[in-house]
Amino acid sequence: MSYSVVKGTSYILVHAPDMVLHNGTTQTTEKHLNPNSEYLKNLPNSLRSYEEAVNYLPNQVYIGNNTPEDLRSNPQPWVGLDVPGASRNGKYGEILPQDEFIGLIKIVDAFDLVKLTTDFTAKVKKQLGDHPLISDELISRMKAGDELADIEKLIAEQGAEPIYLDNQLIGCVKRAHDVDVNLNAHVIFENLVSKASGVLAALHLVKNTGIDPAEIEYVLECSEEACGDMNQRGGGNFAKAIAEVAGLVNASGSDVRGFCAAPTHAMISAASLVKAGTFKNVLIVSGGSTAKLGMNGKDHVKKGLPVLEDVIGGFAVLISENDGVSPVLRTDLVGRHTVGTGSSPQAVITSLVTEPLDRGNLKITDIDKYSVEMQNPDVTKPAGAGDVPNANYKMIAALGVKRGELDRNDINDFIIKHGMEGWAPTQGHIPSGVPYVGFAKEELEKGNIKRVMIVGKGSLFLGRMTNLFDGVSIVMEKNQGIVEESKGVSQDEVRSLVAEAMRDFASHLLQG
């Protein structure tokens, strides 16, 4: 059976401290409910500098300069532990500074809704002109900029969303409709942030893989945002919008949504499309979310920590036809949380982990690494959510004990051998399974490991349409070389067989 393969990945972060202050849902809600709170007073002094965000070990792991093993060799917490020689540029992507990202937001704006001051525009054009992935054609979309007074008027009179840099007003996002709440300035800003970060991830993916952009035929976008208007609030299409800016001229695409589990849903869909022969190259891409910036900020500030949720995440994965080298995606070993599964932790892990393994006659210990909800414990522990990856690994190990595949005394060893410390920012869908795909590809190709399970889980009840939980999983496996599908007999072979049969029949008659 010839499976599709993971051809390449990219991972990007955007440092966005001003967006923490002015766009993160925790902060905007606090300003509405309690504008004079101690939290809001202390927040500006709890924001990290760009250099501090770049030097932070989990961020360096995310873009590929460090490995998950480096996290384990440095005890938690990692706050304050500067990585020697840390760089904004990594093997998989980069950590983009906020000013350059604001410029990119303007570049991806197709309806002239983003207004930036003349001075800032001139400065950021020069900065982006030095960026190896931002072409002159893209920079030319920025125009000359606007007067600050005109921007202030749009904010005061038309409800435009302000854009700040170092807490100074440098632009705004206009509303796209006078009365449609789905096109108000706040929503348009969120969507442009998701689009811009997705574009950056797509550009890095093209660079990392060396693929001709024209060879990408389909794009699946899998963030947690939704674009549309009053008649179809989530109509989309982020996928095609990102493909347009990234120069994927031959691509079509659509959006996949499933809360945190969407990236793994997208991997399964992409792998199936390629394996079926529908498309040769499918790009999975996702931008990040401003809403989740500073989501646990109150707990961080209360405990004297910097606000660690100060980065927007993004990633991309290229799924292609089997090349005999890249890791295969076992579409026959897919786990799924069904409507009838139930929501207990044991039921969830059983449906996502052990049921697909049973179909492949595999034990829990036959998976070398499990990539689950790879959330950074530096973020979640102070907020009372504990170490999320570790909790997942304990549950998988407990099932191994119950199945007789693991001794109770070996649970901790299992966690160390088959698990990892979390490093992804809490951007919802960003931590869910996919952060390890890039590392998994490398380790599988080197032969250091044989199998990895990517697990995505989601909370569908957040949409108030169902109380159900959600989750899917898929196994990545070392490529054993291209195995051709069994093909039908050709016309020439049919003619040859018929001629041979006729000769045998004539010979039989003569002998009779």
Image (cartoon, rainbow, N blue to C red):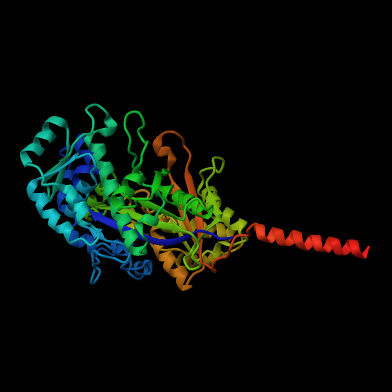
Residue 227 appears in which quarter of the rendering? Answer: top left
Q: Dividing the image into 4 quarters, which one contains the C terminus?
A: bottom right
Name which residue lies at 44% across and 49% down. 266
Tag count: 0
Report x, y in % for residue 108.
24, 47
Residue 296 seen by the camera: no
Residue 48 appears in which quarter of the rendering? Answer: bottom left
Q: Return the residue nearer the eye: 141 or 265.
A: 141
Q: Is residue 204 left or right of residue 485?
A: left
The vertical placement of 161 against 140, above or below, is above
Residue 212 appears in which quarter of the rendering? Answer: bottom left
Name which residue lies at 35% across and 71% down. 73
Q: Is residue 107 left or right of residue 211?
A: left
Report x, y in % for residue 40.
17, 44
Q: Dividing the image into 4 quarters, which one contains the N terminus?
A: bottom right
Name which residue lies at 62% across and 56% down. 359
**Furthest residue toward right:** 512
Q: Return the residue nearer the eye: 453 or 82.
A: 453
Report x, y in % for residue 498.
75, 59
Q: Return the residue nearer the eye: 496 or 1.
A: 496
The vertical placement of 356 against 470, above or below, is below
Residue 128 seen by the camera: yes
Q: Is residue 345 left or right of residue 386?
A: right
